[in-house]
Image: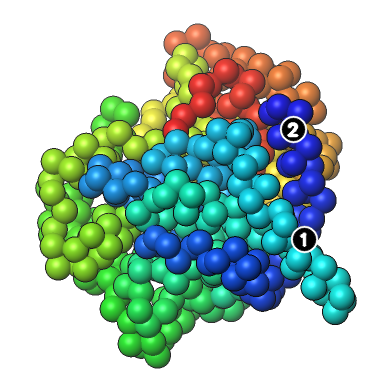
Amino acid sequence: MSPELREVYAALLERAPENRIAPDLSRITRVMELMGDPQNSYRSIRIAGTNGKTSTARILERILREAGLRTGRTTSPHLRSPVERIAIDGVPIDEDGFLQAYRDVEPFAAIVDAEQEAVGGVRLTYFEYLTAMAFQAFASSPVDVAVVETGLGGTWDATGAVAPDVAVITPISLDHQEYLGETVAEIAGEKAGILTADATAVIASQPFQDAADVLRERIAELGAEAAIEDQQIGVLSHTPGVGGQMLTLQGIAGRYEEVFLSLLGEHQARNALLAVAAAEALLGDGSTALDGELLSAALSSVTSPGRAEVVRQAPTILLDAAHNPAGALTLVETVRENFRFTHTVGLLGILQEKDAADILEVLEPLLDSVVITQSSSPRAISTDRLADLARDIFGDEDRVVEQASLPDAIQAAVDLAEQGGDQFGGVVVAGSVTLVAEVREMLGVPEED
């Protein structure tokens, strides 16, 4: 980052951080009102859920671009630079564009901050400010449609300033319980806050019946149009292949046979299904099928950095931002379906607010050995504490290597994967987005759109 971008990012970080929410839409709606409600100048699709939001957003945005629309996309968190959070036509805005968006919001944020301070309220949070920047950047571009990923929850999330044409909810499980509720039903209630009577609802098959019940009841209360996985829409088949998988999908308006998706894992097939249904709802009100060639071109070229991403061969290094038990389970299933490692090494680092024990327990059967480390995040669990937990769960001290230095940890994992001569070893990097981002950078993986 340039010195100016570092200064602006530091100013953003001084606000309430991303993992702390102040559940109130009044600040974001007020700043948007002062700015002339730029978020109402384009159509929008809003995405909530526990896992799969970013990949679904990227697939959907790629389909809409292939259909000829100018797109905006806002996702979180970022891997390397905050500019990644705001993309126009699939490409993150440059530093100048990010700085301009910050300056565009600045005078209005100052007004809202002053109003809040006068009544003992909270200044615009970090995420609220970034959301306002994204909405303004999209209007300035201008875009035809914005694909908007929620931050935390749905009901009170800052992205609620938009009135979406389509609302997508990915699978819901336990995560961020300190903010969203202690049960899956409570969390689903927060996620269901993105649903509206005027937006077509596209709903993933839910791993927990309580979540499915909450979503179904909310849709019925609203009288909203809905496309629910395994009811109106579904993945009819998926066959793993080199560099991706072949899919047959049943959308709202059409059936799509033998379409190649350039992402690994059954979960990505399901994410693609949600994206296809959302695109059908936006482009043709759910009554017109997508052009087959258009869909093939989009799905065959989509990327999702840090999500089941192979970044090196011999040994294979797979990066996945699995940071909760549900994400870890999906990662295990993806590795077992797509790889035939004879020796699998984990490189793990987890943040303090996460269910580290549950994540380790899910990953343990997959991993022959594990290298425990930590990212540079101040929220990272210390290497020694996470290693002690790993030893208890893995049951054999010889399976656990402790290495606080991330470069040394990467090398240790590679060395372990290469032991055994003719064995086909692999390294699976997981546990947090920050760890994946730093490993990705250290390995010199080029930035992608």
- Residue 305 placement (x, y as % from top left): 48, 35
Nearer to me, 138 or 140: 140
**Mark number displayed over residue 214:** none
Residue drawn where x is 27% and y is 71% of the image: 227
Nearer to me, 345 or 128: 128
Quadrant showing the C terminus: top left
Write down the residue under mark 2.
Answer: 4
- Residue 364 placement (x, y as % from top left): 59, 42
Question: Can residue 43 be seen in the rendering of this structure?
Answer: yes
Nearer to me, 206 or 190: 190
Disc 1 residue type?
A: Ala
Write down the residue under mark 1.
Answer: 110
Is 272 positioned to the left or the right of 96 in the image? left
Is 32 positioned to the left or the right of 423 in the image? right
- Pointer 1 or 2: first along the chain: 2
Q: Is residue 168 above or below residue 213?
A: above
